[in-house]
């Protein structure tokens, strides 16, 4: 088979390509330039080491359109965005699938730690959790379409990162010694508020209030905060306080003790279905849900009405954050996902 591989120059994507080449497949590399911070030098080194054809694709316009604008708009609405989810759906996988078809490739591969599986009985594709639970990235892939999933192959689904690094060191691969990148790629300094301000958006100061509406102090602008945040509030109180609610309309941020962040229910919209066929009604008692990337899955009863999922957790969860993704699993496969509202 002939594959188009998204390569960044890191150990994961380099190893994924190496696995397919060793299995006798033809692989073409592609590196997507998302912003001014994209460094293609590592990808060029990887492509040379692998001995593969390498393309560099300028995606800055569509990245700005879909990811950067959504990032700013979501923060300004008082919510917390998931830019990687948006990028995978509208930029990264979308671009790779389109280019793969143009180059006559059978499949697209990336270095994500997950698997793509097909339920032949219903003819639907879904993303499944990786063997290496500490590296599982299925949460970031819930928004992919059936067309995209049909073209996607993830070679690292049964691989453990520590084994990849061991092999990479034995082969003297330069990327085997690099650390993990935890930053948002287009904001490498981590200054989200600065990025939003540079986009020409103003976020004025406002009131910190308690749950009864009493003013506790002044916040720096809602773009500086997210639900569950404790550090950087600058508020003195008899017990630690956390951000429990951000109201963009009133420009207020509600603070509360940690116990008050616990919730038994949530509402999810913008649904995208994978293993579960699209539906506008139904109740499901067997699903697990993740409310953030590193969160442990929690059992929940889920009722779908129209384009909304109403969720009741089996046990209360902390700091449910509007704007973040909620991903629902049937065993290890993504049934569907959506955005916490």
Image (spheres, helix red, strand yellow):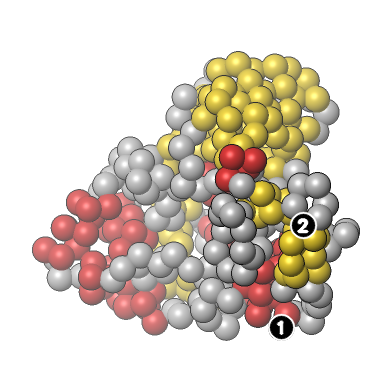
Which badge, 2 or 1, comes first in the chain's sequence?
1
Q: Which residue is drawn at 48% across and 42% down?
A: 295
| Residue 7: percent from left, percent from top | 42, 65
Compare residues 179 and 55 and report the one nearer the observer.
Answer: 179
Q: Which element type, helix, strand or loop, lies under badge 1?
A: helix
Q: Which residue is drawn at 52% across and 30% down?
A: 298
Tell me: 22 left or right of 5. Answer: left
Tell me: 150 left or right of 243. Answer: left
Q: Residue at x 66, y 74 (%)?
A: 193
Q: Nearer the viewer, mark 2 or mark 1?
A: 2
Q: How many C-alpha atoms fall within 10 Å of the one at disc 2: few (<14), some, or many (≥20)? A: many
Tell me: 317 left or right of 220. Answer: left
Q: Mark 2 highlights which residue? A: 209
Q: In which quarter of the image is residue 153?
A: top left
Using the image, determine if residue 136 lies above or below residue 274: below
Tell me: 116 left or right of 203. Answer: left
| Residue 155: percent from left, percent from top | 36, 47
- Disc 2 to disc 1, how far (Cα)? 28 Å
**Could you say which disc has been placed on residue 198 in the image?**
1
Q: Quadrant of the C terminus?
A: top right
| Residue 285: percent from left, percent from top | 60, 16
């Amino acid at each position: 088979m002939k594959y188009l591989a998204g390569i960044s120059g890191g150990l994961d994507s380099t190893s994924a390509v190496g696995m397919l080449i060793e299995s006798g497949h033809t692989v073409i590399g592609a590196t997507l330039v998302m912003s001014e911070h994209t460094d293609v030098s590592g990808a060029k080194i990887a492509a040379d080491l692998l001995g593969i054809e390498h393309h560099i694709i300028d995606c800055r316009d569509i990245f700005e359109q879909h990811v950067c604008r959504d990032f700013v708009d979501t923060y300004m609405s008082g919510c917390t965005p998931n830019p990687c989810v948006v990028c995978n759906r509208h930029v990264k996988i979308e671009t790779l699938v389109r280019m793969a078809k143009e180059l006559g490739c059978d499949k697209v591969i990336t270095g994500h730690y997950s698997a793509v599986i097909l339920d032949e009985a219903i003819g639907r594709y879904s993303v499944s959790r990786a063997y290496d639970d500490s590296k599982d990235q299925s949460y970031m892939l819930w928004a992919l379409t059936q067309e995209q999933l049909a073209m996607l192959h993830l070679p690292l689904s049964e691989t453990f990162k520590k084994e990849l690094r061991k092999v990479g060191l034995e082969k003297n691969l330069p990327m085997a010694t690099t650390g993990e990148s935890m930053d948002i790629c287009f904001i490498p300094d981590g200054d989200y508020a600065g990025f939003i301000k540079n986009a020409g958006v103003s976020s004025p100061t406002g009131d910190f209030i308690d749950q009864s509406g009493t003013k506790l102090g002044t916040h720096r602008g809602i773009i500086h905060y997210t639900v569950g945040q404790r550090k950087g509030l600058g508020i003195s109180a008899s017990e630690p306080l956390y951000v429990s609610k951000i109201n963009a309309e009133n420009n207020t941020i509600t603070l509360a003790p940690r116990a008050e962040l616990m919730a038994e229910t949530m509402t999810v919209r913008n649904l995208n279905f994978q293993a579960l066929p699209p539906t506008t009604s139904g109740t499901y008692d067997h699903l697990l849900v993740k409310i953030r990337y590193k969160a442990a899955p929690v059992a929940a009863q889920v009722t779908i009405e129209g384009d909304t999922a109403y969720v009741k957790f089996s046990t209360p969860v902390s700091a449910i954050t509007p704007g973040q993704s909620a991903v629902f699993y049937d065993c290890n496969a993504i049934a569907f996902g959506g955005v916490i509202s």
